[in-house]
Image: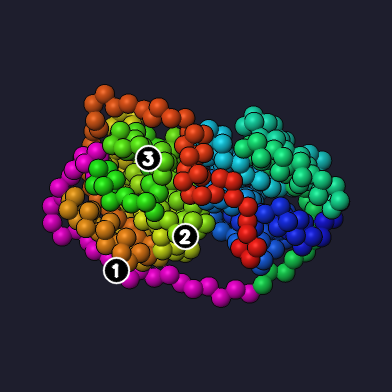
Amino acid sequence: MIITEQFGAELKKLNFSFYSGVPCSYLKNLINYAINDCNYIAAANEGDAIAIASGACLGGRRSVVLMQNSGLANAVSPLVSLNYPFHIPLLGLVSLRGEPGVPDEPQHELMGCITTQLLELMDIEWQYLSPDIDQAKEQLQQAVQVLDQNRSFFFVVKKNTFSKVQLHKHEFTTNRNLFKTKKEKGDQLPSRLEALSVINASKDKTTVQIATTGKTGRELYEIGDSNSNLYLVGSMGCVSSLGLGMALTQQKHDIIVIDGDGSLLMRMGSLATNGFYGTPNMLHILLDNNAHDSTGGQRTVSNHVDFVDIAAACGYGNSLYLHGLNELDHHILDWKRTKGLTFLYIKIAQGSKETLGRPHIKPHEVTARLKKYLGCYPRLLMKGE
């Protein structure tokens, strides 16, 4: 059995101090250690944890994700369509519930048999974590060598690997909504391109823009490509979690997350996580056209959802209903002056620019230039961080 604090200290020596994850009984002691002594972000689900840790990695922090193997299935989408194409390396620890020959609950039986196969199918290097601390130290060195090649590495953790760590009591501050506006008049319904043009025009040298997957990123690219832009491909629903991780680790930059209704509906639990951690340098803009525009215009159910109320209830300091482009421009500029976690909602028209192209830059090239723009390529954790 590994003394958990010793393993954590080794991780710190290797500049790992940012964690995100979802609890598992096999990993509870390492999670307790991370909460007690490191920067741990509790995600609503495992896919969000991957995205949060990926944002922190883009922000210059070596990051760890923790999850049960049943949740590995939830994390497949960002692992294969975010981390793989963008070359964002994470250190993962995934429990081995349902290990063959070890009594466990029936829901873990199949995943216990296929966990390592699933990692291999995703082209993720892995090892069973040794319960011997000296061997585990050697394994961590091997993992870092893989991470330095911009590839993720996962440890598969068996039962009773980590020694007991008592969770300290923490006083949590509840973030509350301070300002909310509701619909007061008709919607202007600008095109997505018009809304993105207004957003992009407010950009300055401290601004990072992260656009959700599909036509949002493609149109932003056509408006004006920039070293400080990131255009998601795949990993639908992960854009605000990615933004949260980056905002927490790059607090001198303004992180503007541009979301879509279909995307946000897919992982709406991220609103609660964003609201709880409440980083003031993140602006979350939702462009709602009540459709999956990138796949043929199929309707979403966004017309039944009051996103402004939900964001406010989740702890966004400001949650505003905008009726048109002038209000969008005004409130972005106002946020740049005042900051505070803010949610801006605007309805847009369906449809997109005709003959819309795709970015000519590869995802991993987007990653490299963004890291350079942020001044963290490469960046080692400084003493005291």
**Alpha carbons under labels 3 and 1: distance apart:** 32 Å
- In the rendered image, the vertical position of residue 361 relative to residue 12, given as above or below: above
Label annotation for residue 226: 3
Residue shown at 66% from the left, 54% from the top: 16
- Which mark lies nearer to you, 3 or 2? 3
Instruction: Inspect this view and state whether residue 21 appears.
Output: no
Percent position of residue 315, x then y: 40, 65
Quadrant of the snapshot with the C terminus: bottom right
**Boundaries of the magenta span:** 169-195
Instruction: Inspect this view and state whether residue 41 appears.
Output: yes
SS at circle 3: loop
- Which mark lies nearer to you, 3 or 1? 3
Percent position of residue 135, x then y: 85, 47
Residue shown at 66% from the left, 40% from the top: 148
Percent position of residue 193, x then y: 24, 38
The foreground one among 227 and 246 is 227
Q: Residues within 10 Å of mark 2 (few under 14, many from 20)?
A: some
Q: How is the image coloured?
A: rainbow
- Which residue is disc 1 drawn over? 179
Considering only order in the chain, which callout, 1 or 2, is on the residue closer to the N terminus?
Answer: 1
The foreground one among 163 and 194 is 194
- Which mark lies nearer to you, 2 or 1? 2
SS at circle 1: strand
Q: Image check: 129 left or right of 257?
A: right
Q: Amino acid at mark 3?
A: Ser
Percent position of residue 183, x then y: 19, 58
